[in-house]
């Protein structure tokens, strides 16, 4: 039976009659027929039932839980500084002459005493032979005047010579003695000048490129030939302010050391700015004797072994200095901490899966984790993954894991 809506219509004679319209009128007004109430209730129930079934199948959202890492830690203070060579020397010629040979490769490592340059030696060898000849002349004169003096002293005993003659021979002897010493000094100087024509490395280290090529004139104590830096061990300099100085000085005194004498022997870790290599152990070995009045800082130095010379003078780096005594610390991943205006929270989950926010006070990062200064005791199960699904007061499906002592990168 066709379902139609009973509505009034007008006949051709102008009278209104209640009854079904013809097919055209009914099709034209079908959209104006209201849906039955029972149908609407059935559809609403069906949608609600589908949602309940879906929730029952999916369950509470899954999250990953873990206990905080609890271990003995030492909080570090971080500073930026620069690596500097333990020693640096500018190599210069000590005699003037024409450069003959370069005996090293640019940028190579050299050892103390290694031959670097040779200056033309011919003029210096001639000067040495001349000095040796002067020695022979002076020695002969000395021997003659000595013999004459001894003879005069024996003759004066018999009165065969005057005192003035003896004095004259003594004067000649003393002059010859002085001339001999002068000739010996000239010979020694000529030998030194000849040795200086061979320029050797004054220290071990990495040598720069040569600044002068063979055939060029070099001047004594003026011409810069090259430079050498010693970078094993290597120094790392950084500045600390008054607050850190007082803290480190107290720590050094507690260990029976002094920050001024040997830097307090504090153990530090130094890393490059890009963290391309693991942090390197070092020791504070020096601090300035006063705080700069203009900057309010004091320069401190750490010394590090650098056998492979991976650390190069001039590089920037970061140093971590122990800023506390060892204590039992509580550490969590940064991903477990959420910000709520000016507060920091972690989400704790109980045995029933209920989520409860816990306010915390974060500290520095250690071993890839964030130190929690207040708010946790280490026994809590906190959300470390899926934090966006763990809303306060909600119920979640927990999956428990163990955090490693050191975070994996």
Image (spheres, grey):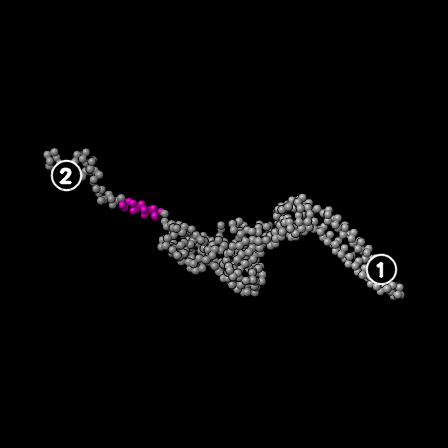
Image location of residue 250, percent across then percent down? 52, 64
Residue 127 magenta: no
Residue drawn where x is 87% and y is 66% of the image: 157
> Quick check: can you spot residue 339?
yes
Residue 55 magenta: yes
Residues 325 and 266: in front is 266
Secondary structure state at the residue bearing disc 1: helix
Residue drawn where x is 21% and y is 42% of the image: 34
Image location of residue 290, percent across then percent down? 54, 62
Q: Residues within 10 Å of mark 1 (few under 14, many from 20)?
A: some
Image location of residue 148, percent across then percent down? 85, 59
The mark that comes first in sequence, 1 or 2, is 2
Q: Which residue is mark 1?
A: 148
> Quick check: can you spot residue 271?
no
Residue 8 is labelled as 2
Secondary structure state at the residue bearing disc 2: strand
Residues 196 and 141: in front is 141
Q: Which residues are magenta?
A: 44-57
Q: Quadrant of residue 4?
A: top left
């Amino acid at each position: 039976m066709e379902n139609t809506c009973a509505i009034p219509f007008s006949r051709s004679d102008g009278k209104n009659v209640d009854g079904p319209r013809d097919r055209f009128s009914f099709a034209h007004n079908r959209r104006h027929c209201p849906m039955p109430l029972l149908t609407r209730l059935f559809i609403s129930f069906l949608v609600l039932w589908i949602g309940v079934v879906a929730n029952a199948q999916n369950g509470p959202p899954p999250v990953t839980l873990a206990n905080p890492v609890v271990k003995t830690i030492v909080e570090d203070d971080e500073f930026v500084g620069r690596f500097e060579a333990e020693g640096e020397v500018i190599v210069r010629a000590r005699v003037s002459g024409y450069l003959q040979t370069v005996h090293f490769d640019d940028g190579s490592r050299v050892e103390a005493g290694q031959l670097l340059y040779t200056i033309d030696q011919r003029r210096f060898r001639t000067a040495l032979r001349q000095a040796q000849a002067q020695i022979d002349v002076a020695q002969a004169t000395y021997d003659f005047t000595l013999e004459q003096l001894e003879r005069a002293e024996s003759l004066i005993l018999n009165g065969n010579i005057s005192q003035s003659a003896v004095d004259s021979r003594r004067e000649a002897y003393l002059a010859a003695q002085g001339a001999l010493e002068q000739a010996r000094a000239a010979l020694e100087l000529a030998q030194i000048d000849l040795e200086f024509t061979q320029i050797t490395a004054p220290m071990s280290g990495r040598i720069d490129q040569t600044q002068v090529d063979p055939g060029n004139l070099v001047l004594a104590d003026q011409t810069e030939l090259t430079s050498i830096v010693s970078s094993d061990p290597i120094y790392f300099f950084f500045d600390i302010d008054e607050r850190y100085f007082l803290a480190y000085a107290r720590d050094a005194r507690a260990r029976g050391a002094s920050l001024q004498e040997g830097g307090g022997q504090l153990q530090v870790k130094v890393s490059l700015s890009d963290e391309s290599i693991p942090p390197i152990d070092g020791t504070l070995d020096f601090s300035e004797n006063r705080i700069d009045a203009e900057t309010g800082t004091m320069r401190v130095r750490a010394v590090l072994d650098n056998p492979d010379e991976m650390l190069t003078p001039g590089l920037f780096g970061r140093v971590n200095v122990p800023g506390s005594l060892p204590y039992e610390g509580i550490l969590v991943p940064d991903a477990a901490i959420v910000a709520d205006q000016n507060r920091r929270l972690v989400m704790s989950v109980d045995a029933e899966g209920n989520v409860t926010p816990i306010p915390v006070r974060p500290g520095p990062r250690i071993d890839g984790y964030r130190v929690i200064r207040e708010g946790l005791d280490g026994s809590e199960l906190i959300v470390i993954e899926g934090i966006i699904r763990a809303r306060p007061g909600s119920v979640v499906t927990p999956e428990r894991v163990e955090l490693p002592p050191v975070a994996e990168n």
